[in-house]
Amino acid sequence: MCGVVGIVGSSPVNLPLYNSLQVLQHRGQDAAGIVTVDEDDNFHQRKANGMVTEVFQQRHMLRLKGNIGIGHSRYPTAGSSSAAEAQPFYVNSPYGIALAHNGNLINSKELKEKCKKAHRHVNTQSDSEILLNILAWKISNIEHDVPTEDDIFNAVSGVYEEIRGGYAVVSLVLGVGLIAFRDPCGIRPMVLGSKTTEDGKVEYMVASESVALDVSGFKLERDVKPGECLLITKEGKLFSKICAKTPTLQSCIFEYVYFARPDSIIDGASVYATRVRMGTKLAQQIQNEHKDLKIDVVIPIPDTSVDIAVQIARTLGVPYRQGFVKNRYIGRTFIMPGQKQRKKSVRNKLNPIPAEFLGKNVLLVDDSIVRGTTSLQIVQMAREAGAKQVFFASASPEICYPNIYGIDMPTSKELIAYGRSNEEICKEIAADALIYQKLEDLEASVTEENPELTKFETSIFTGKYVVPPADDYFDNIEKQRSDDAKADKAWKDSSDADELDIFNI
């Protein structure tokens, strides 16, 4: 999962891009990058491993000249954590193209072979670089010196015919402007915003989440439609077209559960409102099916589950308490590469307040249970703090299958719910009771906020993929995503330079 942003403005965009990446930091903490285009049609770039505030210093910001630009915050799902795979990527032919991408291509192996046949070189293991070269290949077929909007839309239509997966893309084409497009199922989110300057000029912005628009003063216009391509020319004119065949909206429901910020709106549904509804439905399930549980206090696992836990407590009529203090300077453990690092980080990240646990039957609420490592440690911490009984509630159903559209979940064998009953999982995390959200309730939590959302990407729960992968796909991702594979990658990447500073292409 990554964060992407693109702006076409009438004034320098370096600071708005930086501010937007900061509020999208939760979507990727591995690397960050910005590319801008100056008035002479020259690219300026800065990208490196690290958090946004670490990557961009004042000297870098001064170099990022221009009124058009794109930005990216990365967490690796395909490829490695090497600085060489930080985004955006760039090719100088045709025209000069830069691209950043959120999501995952499930036919990248096949696409890499097509790049070779098209005489286009892919230098890394990143599927984003492959996507860039596929786009460049299609644009290279344009015969005009300056492509028209129809030329661009035809090229992107060609891209849709080649690539498969979930993706949201922002790209700069020199002499043309900003291109943004979203996968035909709308799996990965993307929004469009605008604002009018004091002199009456309209500026446009696209981003992974609406919160990125808010921080830079842009108004949310709408979501980019599934299979839709936007072209915003360097003069500030907006064109749009559905370029994919038979698009259908099937949002990734895990965006609402975990990844998105609560103050974002995705596909017309407030993330905060959907989480409140998740809490209501979980509480109703507890009331109907777990009447024997004597709950004294509801405590969230910060931060994603806070809104859910508040609503559970309100519905059940029991006290809500902040039982854990979070270290804000520790990243999200879910996306940390390797079991040992995750285990170490949980204790560093959370510290219990003993008075909220001592002698009480505690209901802990989390957004999900993936590997179970974090859940086990949190239950143990609650018991060490004096809890009499520890019950555990998950806002999402049992996660049994890997995500292949841009969320780096492990292979099925590393998922605690795979092949285990509720009782077995409960024992594994050392809880006294375990309550999972039902899938139909989770879907209803979003649909009730926006009735037009009736289909969702729920493969991590069901194993049914809206864009089916090749037969050998899961064998390949096991080699890439298992903890052993990540440990090997980390060792290899450790020999890389600390950062990649390319500031004037």
Image (cartoon, rainbow, N blue to C red):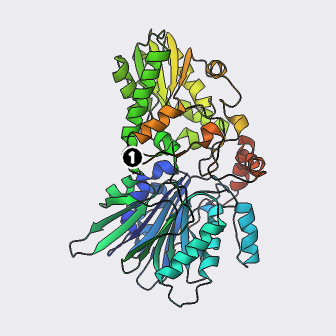
Instruction: Name the residue located 48 percent from the left edge and 72 percent from the top edge.
Output: 179
Instruction: Count neighbours of disc 1 (C-alpha within 10 A) and say few if under 14, some if 14 to 19, many if 20 or more.
Output: many
Percent coordinates x, y for residue 305 in the rendering: 44, 33
Q: How many marks?
A: 1
Q: Is residue 117 left or right of residue 190?
A: right
Three-letter code for the amino acid on which mark 1 is drawn: Ala
Q: Residue at x 40, y 52 (%)?
A: 23
Where does the image place residue 485, in percent across and percent down from the top left?
74, 46
Q: Residue at x 56, y 64 (%)?
A: 87
Looking at the image, residue 75 lies above or below residue 59: above
Label 1: which secondary element:
strand
**Residue at the outermost left position:** 198
Q: Is residue 35 visible?
A: no
Q: Quadrant of residue 353?
A: top left
Q: Is residue 207 above or below residue 60?
A: above
Q: Nearer the viewer, residue 436 or 132?
A: 436
Q: Position of residue 174 (x, y in %)?
A: 50, 81
Left or right: where 404 falls relative to 308: right
Q: 171 left or right of 219?
A: right
Residue 358 drawn at (x, y percent): 44, 11
Q: Nearer the viewer, residue 460 or 295?
A: 460
Rendered view: 458 above or below 22 = above
The C terminus - image quarter: bottom right
The quadrant where residue 434 appears: top right
Q: Is residue 87 visible?
A: yes
Extreme residue toward the front, this view = 246
Judging by the rendered image, the residue that carries numbered circle 1 is 269
Residue drawn at (39%, 45%), measured in percent from left and top? 450
